[in-house]
Amino acid sequence: MAETRYCYRHPKRETRVSCATCGRPICTECMRQTDVGIKCPDDARLPRSARTGVMKTNQVLWSLLAGLAVVVVGLPVAFLATQIGAGSLILCGLAGYGAGTLILRAGGRNGGPVAMTIAGVAVALAFLPFLGPRLLEGNISPFAILEPLVAIGFAIYNSRGS
């Protein structure tokens, strides 16, 4: 059985309803019926275009956590991409696309500058251990620089939101 949840505006009221946008629990008095589902009063006031890029604190924290996961999972992917020749740009594009999607969804699909920055930095950090030393030595080909740029580009583009 699910744990008991309480309305974020009325802490003594039990509820099974949550906002379709932010996921906070809301009671029947607080819920607002919209074209796209039940929302809390805060999210029901704004049209979707006004909310894009506006992230609440918990959404930023989830995005940062997703960014950390992108770095950890991205390390072996970046290593593989720097070692293989053929197909590395495709691998980097797919990895960047996945990273952007993960960060966008972790942040409540709001996207915007915060999510885009987290996505770009996370992907760059995954490539840094493998390309950093070669960059400092000056011993790197232009193609090797293209791989992280493709991954970063896809991650930023896909985390922008709608």
Image (tube, helix red, strand yellow):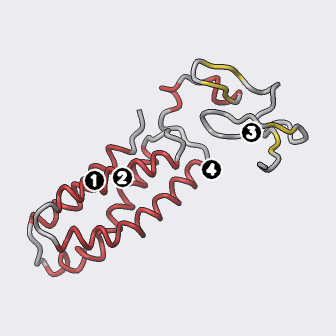
Residue lying at 44% horizontally and 40% vertically, measured from the top left: 112
Q: Residue at image x 35%, y 55%?
A: 120
**Mark 3: amino acid:** Pro
The three-letter amino acid code for the residue at tag 4 is Asn
Disc 2 to disc 1: CB gap under 8 Å: yes
- Of badges 3 and 4, the one in the foreground is 3
In terms of sequence position, does the residue under pointer 3 or pointer 2 come before the other?
3
- In the rendered image, residue 80, in percent from the top left (x then y), is placed at 24, 71
**Cα separation between marks 1 and 4:** 27 Å
Residue under label 2: 98
Disc ID at residue 25: 3
Mark seen at residue 94: 1
Along the line of sight, the residue nearer the viewer: 132 or 33: 33
Q: CA distance from mark 2 to mark 4?
A: 21 Å
Q: Position of residue 17 (x, y in %)?
A: 74, 34
Q: Earlier in the sequence, mark 2 or mark 4?
A: 4
**Mark 4: which secondary structure?**
helix
Q: Tag 2's secondary structure? A: helix
Residue drawn at 47 percent across, 64 percent down: 68
Q: Find residue 49 and report its horizontal and vertical position in percent.
A: 48, 26
At numbered mark 3, what does the secondary structure look like: helix, strand or loop? loop
Label 3, label 1: how far apart the Cα atoms are: 35 Å
Lateral position of residue 149 relative to residue 44, left or right? left
Q: Residues within 10 Å of mark 3 (few under 14, many from 20)?
A: many
Q: Quadrant of residue 99?
A: bottom left
Image quadrant holding the C terminus, namely: top left
Name the spot of residue 53 as percent of width and height, x first: 48, 38
The residue wearing badge 4 is 58
